[in-house]
Image (cartoon, rainbow, N blue to C red):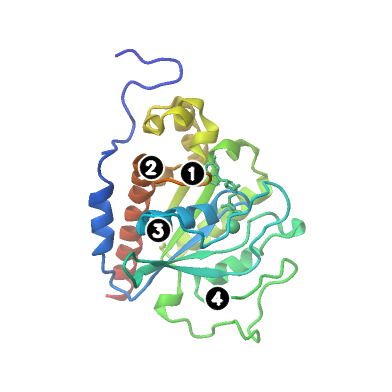
């Protein structure tokens, strides 16, 4: 088969498009070595963090869910100013043994973004749920939301950077530098790191028409490469996905890409925990 100008003949990562049920089962019975694994999502405002959490919850429940309040406007200051932990619900009751921590956007501090120092405190488990970030100054040890003795469950076990495929090229150097600083800190702590590249449908017409072309689109491959170069994250830790954002009904292709990413995130987080505490 010939390769067209927009499409690779062979996908650069294999996807078993019918694998959703299998991964879903794996997650259903997944028992981490800690009571709860904590996944921190960070990235610029509008990247799709809240949408990603809602998409995961929706897939796990098998129905529409609105837990993390997506932002409807694409511009303006970050909507989420508070640190909020989402413990995902199981269909039929109970919760999964992992949480997503959603924090406000990563715009530069002088534009009202969260301080780098605060994100590092989050990684260390020092900031409790419900704390409202102050873009002008980091948390102090006398704050009631400051956790002096973080439990292993309060610490972050995987750092997930969320970046929108359609605007990676336009991300400001300040935001990239900020993400790099956080990444370096996480790397010093030995913490696994993953990039979720959202909005593949907006970045590539071929993929917009058929999500199964995601690993054959030259455009998406370029975006993944760009993301890898900008942040210094290896290609194999970058997961292109499309979030649920306007759809009401479930789409198995959307599900499988998100589930593949989630399975790896949880496995990496659990490996990290095992290395730390066993
Ligand atoms: N087309 C498309 N839109 C998305 C995707 N993910 C998020 N969005 C839209 O991007 C906007 C910002 O998303 P949101 O989750 O609020 O971003 P956050 O600031 O990172 O939490 C919303 O209008 C979403 O509907 C995606 O994968 N594809
Ligand atoms: Mg949000």
* Relative depth, front residue between 58 and 138: 58
Neighbours of disc 1 within 10 Å: few (<14), some (14-19), many (20+): few
Q: Earlier in the sequence, mark 2 or mark 4?
A: 4
Which sits earlier in the primary sequence, circle 1 or circle 4?
A: 4
Quarter occupied by residue 36: bottom left
Q: Alpha carbon of mark 3 to alpha carbon of mark 1: how far?
A: 32 Å
Front of the two marks 3 and 1: 1
Query: What number is the disc on residue 251?
Result: 2
Q: Secondary structure at mark 1?
A: loop
Which of the 4 quarters of the picture holds residue 70?
bottom right
Query: Which of marks 3 and 2 precedes in the sequence?
Result: 3
Q: CA distance from mark 2 to mark 1?
A: 9 Å
Q: Residue at the spot x=63%, y=54% of the render?
A: 71
Query: In what element is the residue under mark 3?
Result: loop
Labels 3 and 4: the sequence-earlier one: 4
Residue 112 visible: yes
Q: Is mark 3 within 8 Å of ligand 1?
A: no
Which residue bears the numbered disc 3? 192
In the picture, the disc for residue 247 is 1
Point out residue 242 in the picture as x, y percentages from the top left corner.
Answer: 46, 42
């Amino acid at each position: 088969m010939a390769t067209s100008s927009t499409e690779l003949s062979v996908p650069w990562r294999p996807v078993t498009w019918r694998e959703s049920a299998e991964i879903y089962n794996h997650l259903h019975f997944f028992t981490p070595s800690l009571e709860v694994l904590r996944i921190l999502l960070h990235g610029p405002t509008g990247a799709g963090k809240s949408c990603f959490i809602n998409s995961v919850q929706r897939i796990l429940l098998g129905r529409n869910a609105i837990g993390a309040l997506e932002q409807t406007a694409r511009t303006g200051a970050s909507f989420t100013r508070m640190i909020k932990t989402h413990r995902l619900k199981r269909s039929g009751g109970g919760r999964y043994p992992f949480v997503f921590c959603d924090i406000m956007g990563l715009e530069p501090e002088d534009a009202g973004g969260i301080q780098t120092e605060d994100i590092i405190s989050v990684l260390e488990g020092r900031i409790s749920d419900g704390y409202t970030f102050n873009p002008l100054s980091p948390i102090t040890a006398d704050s009631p939301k400051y956790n002096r003795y973080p439990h292993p469950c309060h610490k972050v076990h995987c750092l997930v950077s969320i970046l929108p495929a359609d605007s990676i090229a336009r991300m400001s150097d300040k935001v990239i530098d900020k993400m790099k600083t956080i990444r370096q800190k996480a790397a010093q702590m030995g913490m696994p790191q993953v990039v979720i590249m959202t909005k593949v449908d907006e970045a590539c017409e071929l993929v917009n028409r058929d999500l199964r072309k995601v690993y054959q689109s030259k455009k998406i491959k370029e975006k993944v490469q760009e993301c890898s170069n900008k942040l210094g994250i290896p290609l194999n830790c970058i997961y292109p996905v499309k979030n649920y954002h306007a759809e009401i009904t479930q789409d198995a292709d959307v599900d499988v890409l998100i589930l593949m990413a989630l399975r790896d995130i949880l496995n990496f987080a659990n490996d990290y925990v095992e290395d730390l505490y066993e």
